[in-house]
Image (spheres, helix red, strand yellow):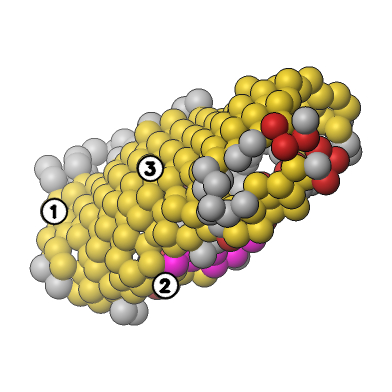
Amino acid sequence: MRFTASFLTGRIDDIALQRGRIVIEPVLDDIQKNAMISLNAKGAASTAMDLARQAGLSQYGSFDFSKIKADGEIEFSLEAALPLGKHGSMANRIQKLDATISNGSFRNLPNQMNVDDAELVVDISTDNSQITGTATVYGAPSEFSLEIDHQKRHVELVGQTPPSALLATAIAKIFDLDIAGSIGGKIVYSGDPSMSEAKIGMTVDLGSASINVPKLNWAKLPAEDGRATMTILLRKGEVASLQNIDVAAGSLSAQGQMAFDTTGQDTGRLFRTRCLAGK
C-alpha cells in the first residue's frame, strides 16, 4: 500500500511552492521506510539560503554557509528521501537539486570574495554537482563553470575574466611587482574544496597594465602587448611553488619557476630572462 499526497500551491515565507508530492511506500509494513519528497518552487534567494541552513547545510570545504549572505531570485526543483522515525539533516538527504539564480549576489565568500550580477544554472546530485554561468567577481565580469566530484572531494573550476584592476593587484602581490592598470585572463583550478592541495593554471593578459621592475631597468607601458602563463601549486592552503612561468611583455621575456617555504618566503628560483631595454 502506498500513501501519496500532492499539492499544487503553497508558501514557505516568500518561497512560492508551485507543485509537489510526498510518497511513502509501503505504509503498513513494519520496516524502515523513506518519505520521498519532490517539489518545485521559486522566490527570494535569501529565503532559500535560510531554509537550506535550517535543513542542516553548514559547511563545504572553505564555504561557511552560516556566514554567506545571498540575494536575488531562485527557481528550483528538489528531490529528497527522508527516513521516517529517524533524526538527521535534510541537506544530506537531497538526491537531486536543479536551480536557476537570477540577478544574484553573494557576500562573505572565501578569500573576502563578493559576487554580484550572478546568472547561474545549478545541478546538484549525490555524486556530482555542476554550476555554470556569469557573475561579477572582485568587481570584474566573469564567466565560469564549476564541477564537483563529491565522492572524491575534487573540484574543477574554469573562470575567465576581462581586464580588472583587482586581478592586477593580486598578481602584483604574488610577484612583489609594481603593477598598475588592469589585468584579465583565464584561471583553471583543480583540487580539493578547501583549497588545501590544488593546482591553479593561469593565462594572463597584460596588455592593459603598466609594470615597473627597477632591478632590471625595465618597464612596460600600458600600450605595449603582454601575456603571462604559469601554474600555481598550493599545499596546506599556501602557495608552494610557481611553475611553468612564461612571460612576454614589451621588451621583456622570461621563463622559469619559483618555490616558497611554509612562511611564504622565496626559497629558490630558476629563471631565463631577456630584457632588450636592459642591454
Q: CA distance from mark 2 to mark 3?
A: 20 Å
Among numbered discs 2 and 3, the one appearing first in the sequence: 2
Q: Can you say whether 239 is above or below 103 in the image?
A: above
Q: Give the spatial CA distance, label 3 vs label 1.
A: 38 Å
Please state the extent of the stretch shown in magenta in the rendering: 106-116
Three-letter residue code for mark 2:
Asp
Residue 193 sits in which quadrant? top right
Q: Residue furthest front?
A: 279
User: What kind of residue is marked 3?
Assistant: Ser
Name the residue: 11% across, 68% down: 8
- 102 displayed left or right of 274: left
| Amino acid beneath label 1 | Thr
Q: Which residue is mark 2?
A: 71
Residue drawn at the location 38% of the way across and 32% of the way down: 127
- Please identify the residue farthest to the bottom as the structure is shown: 13
Q: Earlier in the sequence, mark 1 or mark 2?
A: 1
Let me know if residue 170 appears in the view.
no
Residue 266 or 127: which is nearer the viewer? 266
Q: Which residue is mark 1?
A: 4
Q: Quadrant of residue 206?
A: top right
Question: How crowded is the residue under tag 1: few (<14 C-alpha within 10 Å), some, or many (20+)?
Answer: few
